[in-house]
Amino acid sequence: MPALPKGLKPRYVHVIDAVWHINETNGQEIGTARVSDVSAFLGVTTPSVTKLVGEMVELGLVVKHMDAADRRAVTLTLTERGLDIRRVYVEEYHAHLSQLLGGLTVEQCETTVRTLTEALRLMQEDAQHRKSM
């Protein structure tokens, strides 16, 4: 896996993948992914995605489309460069992981899922406990 190109933040790859999944799910040529959809998909705040999208537009990774009927509504599509970034840093990475982890048994995978699920539960409980203090 090559290093990210200079100026490309890892967070951009997450946004690119979210935009791709949202648009692919809806089967649309023109983007249907809104910033709020991307923030919900990633579980992050809308203002943080808005900032990232602005940076990504400047880098030629994403295009914003204004809705003629509602000027506040903006949808997103990936540029060819954005699609290339996704291919290398999502698709090829997943293929590499699949090959790398292909030797694990189903039992090993299930044990790992159970362990990580329990670890997540414990961390979420701890976070809730700390909030209530």
Image (cartoon, rainbow, N blue to C red):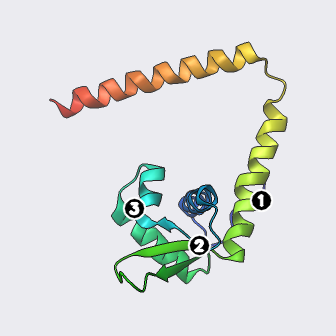
Foreground label between 2 and 1: 2
Q: Quadrant of the C terminus?
A: top left
Residue at horizontal 35 percent and vertical 57 percent from the top: 45
Residue 64 position, x and y percent, is 51, 79
Residue 105, image quadrant: top right
Q: Which residue is mark 3?
A: 36
Residue 5 shows up from this direction: no
Q: Eyeballing the image, is 115 above or below 85?
A: above
Q: Residues within 10 Å of mark 1 (few under 14, many from 20)?
A: few
Quick one: SS at disc 1?
loop
Q: Are marks 3 and 1 in contact (CB under 8 Å)?
A: no
Gap in angstroms between the C-alphas marked 3 and 2: 14 Å
Q: CA distance from mark 2 to mark 1?
A: 24 Å
The residue beneath circle 1 is 2
Mark sitting on residue 77: 2
Which amino acid, by three-letter code, is at mark 1? Pro
Q: Nearer the viewer, residue 49 or 3?
A: 49
